[in-house]
Image (tube, rainbow, N blue to C red):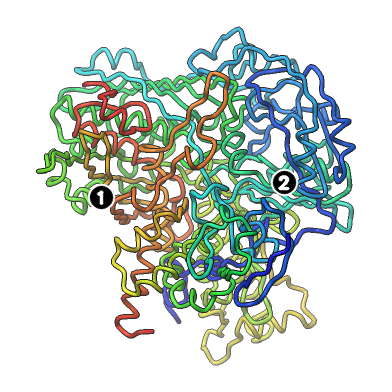
Amino acid sequence: MKNPIERGGVGASVRKKDSMQLLTGKPVYLDDLPEPAGCLTVKLLRSPHANALIREIDVTAAISLPGVAAVYTYLDVPSERYTEAGQTYPETSPHDRLILDRHLRHVGDPVAIVAAENEEAAEKALAAIRVTYDPLPAVLDFRTAKDNPALVHPEEDWHSLCPFTGGDPKRNLCASGEEGEGDVDAVLASCDLVIEHPYHVKAVNQVPFETFRTMTELDAYGRLRVVSSTQIVFHVRRIIAHALGIPKSAVRVEKPRIGGGFGAKQTAVSEVYPAFVTWKTGRPAKLVYTRKESLEAGSPRHEMEITVCLGAMNDGTIRAIDLYSLSNTGAYGEHGWATVGLTAHKSIPLYTSSVEAFRFTYDVVYTNVQSSGAYRGFGATQGIFAVESAVNELASRLGMDPLEIRLKNCVKEGQTMPAYYNEPASSCNLTGCLTECAEKFGWKEKYPVRVMPDGKIRSAGMAMAMQGSGISGIDVGSATVKLEDDGGYTLLIGAADMGTGCDTILAQMLADAMECPLEKIAVRGADTDLSPYDSGSYASSTTFVTGKAVVLAADELKGKMRKIAAKLLKADEETLLFEDNTFFTADRTASVTAAALANASMDGNDVPVEATATNSHPFSPPPFMVGMVETETDPGTGSVKILDYQAVVDCGTVINPALARVQAEGGIVQGIGMTLFEDIHYGKDGKLAENSLMQYKIPTRLDIGRLHVDFAPSYEEAGPYGAKSIGEIVINTPAPAIAHAVYRATGQWFRTLPITPDKVALGMGEDE
Amino acid sequence: MEITFTLNGKPVSVSVSPDTPLLDLLRSLGMKSVKCGCENTVCGLCTVFLDEKPVLSCSVPAARVSGKSVTTLEGLTEEAEAFIGFIADQGADQCGFCNPGYVMNTIALLRENPDPTDDEIRACLAGNLCRCSGYEGQLRGIRAFLDAKKEGKR
């Protein structure tokens, strides 16, 4: 029997199954695929105002232009509000949108949909639409949104399917609430030291290189076929059905290869418009967002200001954390309630060992900027920046080593985490991550501040992080495994590989389960007509939730194959051995391979050689991580250069070390980007300044120093082969670690991201 | 306007409007490896060779390639296949959308400098952005290829 590594199973750094197609530039993305004949080009006229009502809109000139097939305004669309958030139904995001609305709530909000024979005709039609706007006062500063007399959603038909989320549109609240455990005020009052500051994270953009895009057509059955660059085919099906007011059974959603997601495509940003055009005209339609549209009307991270109040004793014991998170959901409430929760649920539990009491209060406010959405880290990133920065400041004020303070207070395996829905730390090697990271990084040597001969200052900083592995008790993953003629298997999934390699790692798990070579496994996903139901690829769910479904489906299929094998081998099925994709009699004198069994299954057989399993888990075992960074700060120019970044991750069993490493490196680099470069400014008119990649600066390969990623795995019993997740946690340590290193170099805490050279050079941080 | 140029070694005659970018022309001719990432010369995804030199096709008017030779990754598959497997071994292809651009620039680099240092690789590919990989895996892949070549494994 081959070992798992040889067959390309769990633990093998095999290539992604689509690698060579991607590296040779094969036409596998949405806009590369052949267009159905007569496919219309869809474009959106967008609002120039941050808050306005349409007084008058005249499309007669536009519709009469040659090549223009249709122009739609708010008068043409259904009046039932919906949400674009890709969440399990009933969504926690309020139903606050129409396909087109008379009330425009941000610069870039769609005013009209144009469908034309080609792009040129569509552009001319956009220019020919005459609109008179009645501008309204806009809410642009999220600190003034709550109870502002200017309302983002004054309409009466705003509604929430989940009233527990605490939304109140008459107060510009998308969500609000309070939770906690213990008497925080009393514990804080008895602490030796209390650190209290607000920390501000901007609405950074995911920048997947493939912008939002969707193609739609009516298929041979008259159903709406939607091909889209999405992480959530099943949610998109439901969202389109709600928005268009048509049966869900009339909609099929497929994803091709996706050019990056990072959460951006967990919101149905582009899908509804071409779907509406096709449903109305009967003609195929395609909408490809420009980069400007993706930056101005996408689904970026929620801007948040998180006020941390952290109480500790002089010996470094952290006893209480009180968090107030103010989150800016923008014009619509996509993922508003869900993201803000993670600011606390994935920061406070890091200190479970010592925290006696915590409180978490939050307001998610509407403003007149584009709606926020899901971005890798999903609130945890903002919360961890705040809490980890406060802990670093605590260490500094106590004169303690920040490594020691974390070893003293951090969560340990077996503990119950009150701030994490009272779930257990069933697998946790955070202590191992800390010690190993310190050793590999050289913390003792690099932590002391060193002034170089050229005047530049070398310093170091650190942070810990956690995330989840799917949404506890909600996320569903399914897998269908079919035995094929040659003894190989087809794996059907509804999870979405957006470049992460999940198609491959799920196949690796199946290869181990069936003890067959990885090459014999074909993967197909995701397609609402063909895939078994899956919530989709978000919330770090796929490896843990869908992965377990693959293992369960394989077990079930093996049971069915065993029945056929018993008949063929004329043996009692209980006595059969399964090894190397072959059934053996107990005495090993006779055997039947999966290939032979597959052939036999097509001849007078009544046992299906396929199985579907569905998995959901009541808990969401967190991965843990430690990041340490060495920076070189130039006090003259204020530039902060990353020299080394060392990370150690506990994601449970590492299914594919190469892919896990690249996930970590990619996340760290995105984290470096949001810490040092990526910035968002809205003008007084509500227009976004950074609306191209010339202004919105993501890291290049010269900006990232040297990255080192290692794994210190625990073993998660509930996970497939002991695995947890890795997709999101990896973006969470750079912001607090780099801010820490900059403090060490400058003596100033930077509590608003990004930490740009002008701020450092001008001393715009805050002295301790 | 009518233009004639060589595309991946074959003559092509097409009609283009004066404002058509080379990127759009190439994709309309089926060269789907050429990707649009930013539309304004920042990201490097649309890198092709114009008379054997890498250019950003989003910023080259199609009319300007008249009489010249244009090469896309479709025309260089064999040359790419010498090293891209090493990038795949690192898992650094990820979503793949930016791959053709940096593969083209890597081909250009290796033609000019068959034995680059890591810093030379980083500098040459600095204009090729990637949002997934964090870049290091791409570098490890190219380095592994160069090392294997030196050891005569290939």
Q: Is residue A628 visible?
A: yes
The answer to which of A752 and A468 lies nearer the viewer is A752
User: What amino acid is at disc 2?
Assistant: Leu
Quadrant housing residue A167:
top right
Residue under circle 1?
A: A644
Q: Are marks 2 and 1 in contact (CB under 8 Å)?
A: no
The residue at the point 34 percent across, 51 percent down is: A702
User: What amino acid is at disc 1?
Assistant: Asp
Quadrant housing residue B115:
bottom left
Residue under circle 2?
A: A287
Q: CA distance from mark 2 to mark 1?
A: 42 Å
The residue at the point 68 percent across, 56 percent down is: A31
Image position of A163 with respect to B82: above or below: above
Image position of A483 with respect to B56: above or below: below
Percent coordinates x, y for residue A185 in the rendering: 33, 13
The answer to which of B69 and B91 lies nearer the viewer is B69
What number is the disc on residue A248?
none
Quadrant of the rendering where the N terminus of chain A is positioned: bottom left
How many marks can you see? 2
Q: Is residue A422 visible?
A: no
